[in-house]
Amino acid sequence: MFPCFEATDSFRIIDSRFDALAARAQFVLSGAAAPAASVSGGGDLSGPPLEGKRVALYLGSAEPYRGFDALLAAAEMLSPSLNLTIAIAGPPPSKVPEHPRLRPLGRVDDVAAVFASVDFLINVNRFSLFDLSTIEAAEAGKPLLLHAVGGNRAFERLGAGCVMLPDLEPATIAAGLTRMASLEESTLVALGSQSRDCWERQLTPRHMWERHLVLYDAAKAGT
C-alpha cells in the first residue's frame, strides 16, 4: 500500500525496485489529526518581536532530504524589507544559524499551538511521501508552500490551499516566500480555508479508517 499515487515517485527515488511494486500497488490515502494540546507546551512564538509580522513555519528536521539547507540559503536572498519571520521547529537551535529572520523553536510539543501562531507552512522536502505535518497544517487551516515533489503534489490535487515550488533552487524558494509574505490577508485566509476544507472532506482519521475497512473487505472477498 502507498499513501497516495504521487508518493510512488519518491519511493522510486529511494530505490528503483519500487517501480515494479508501484505498478501493482493499491493506494489508501492517509488521514490524521494533530495531538491534543500539550501541558508542557514547547515552541513559544509569543512576544512583541512577532507582532505585525507574517510568520512561516518550517516543521521537520535538519536531515538533507528535508531541504533545510536550501531554505536557509533562500532566507539569505530575501529582501531585508520583507515582512516575514521563519519559525524553525524540530531542529535543535544549535543547527539554526543566527539570523534576524529565523526564529528557532527547537523541539515542539504543542503542535496545535504552534500552527495557531503562524500564517503558513513551508515544506521543501527533496522527496516526499505524504507528510503528517502537512496533513496537520491542513487541519489547522494553513496555506501550504510546497516543493512540487512526490506526495506534496497530492495536496494540490486534493484541493488544499497550495502554492507550489517547481524546484529547490534558493532563488525559487525565496520567490515563493516573498509571494506568500506579500499576499493580501484575504487571499491567505482563502487559501487556509481551502486547506481546512480539504482536510474535512478527505484527510481526517475517520476517512483513513473507512478506506482501510474498504480495502480489508475487498481482500476478504478476494476482489
Image (spheres, helix red, strand yellow):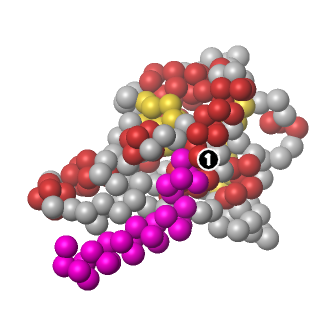
Tell me, yes or no, if residue 93 can be seen here: no
Q: Is residue 208 magenta?
A: yes
Is residue 134 in view from this perspective? Answer: yes
Mark 1 Cα-neighbour bin, 10 Å: few <14, some 14–19, many ≥20: many
Residue name at image x 31 percent, y 48 percent: 6
Q: Between residues 98 and 24, which one lies in front from this camera angle?
A: 24
Looking at the image, residue 108 sits to the left or right of residue 73; the answer is right
* Residue range (magenta): 198-223
Q: Position of residue 169 (x, y in %)?
A: 40, 27
Identity of the residue drawn at 83% across and 47% down:
46
In the image, taking residue 84 as reference, residue 52 lies left or right, namely right
Residue sitting nearer the eye, 99 or 219: 219
Is 213 one of the magenta-colored residues?
yes
Above or below residue 93? Residue 74 is: above
In the picture of the structure, the residue carrying the numbered disc 1 is 196
Give amino acid for label 1: Arg
The answer to whether residue 11 is above or below residue 215 is: above
Name above or below for residue 136 compared with residue 222: above
Query: Which quadrant of the figure has residue 141?
Result: top right
Q: Above or below — where is 209 with respect to 175?
A: below
Taking the spot 74% from the left edge, 68% from the top edge, the residue there is: 38
Q: Residue 39's spot in the image, x, y percent?
A: 79, 71
Residue depicted at 11% across the width and 59% down the height: 20
Residue at the bottom extreme? Answer: 220
**What is the x, y in percent for residue 24?**
15, 61
Q: What percent of the width, then of the height, locates residue 168? A: 40, 32
Q: Quadrant of the C terminus?
A: bottom left
Q: Quadrant of the N terminus?
A: bottom left
Residue sitting at the far right: 48
> Secondary structure beneath disc 1?
helix
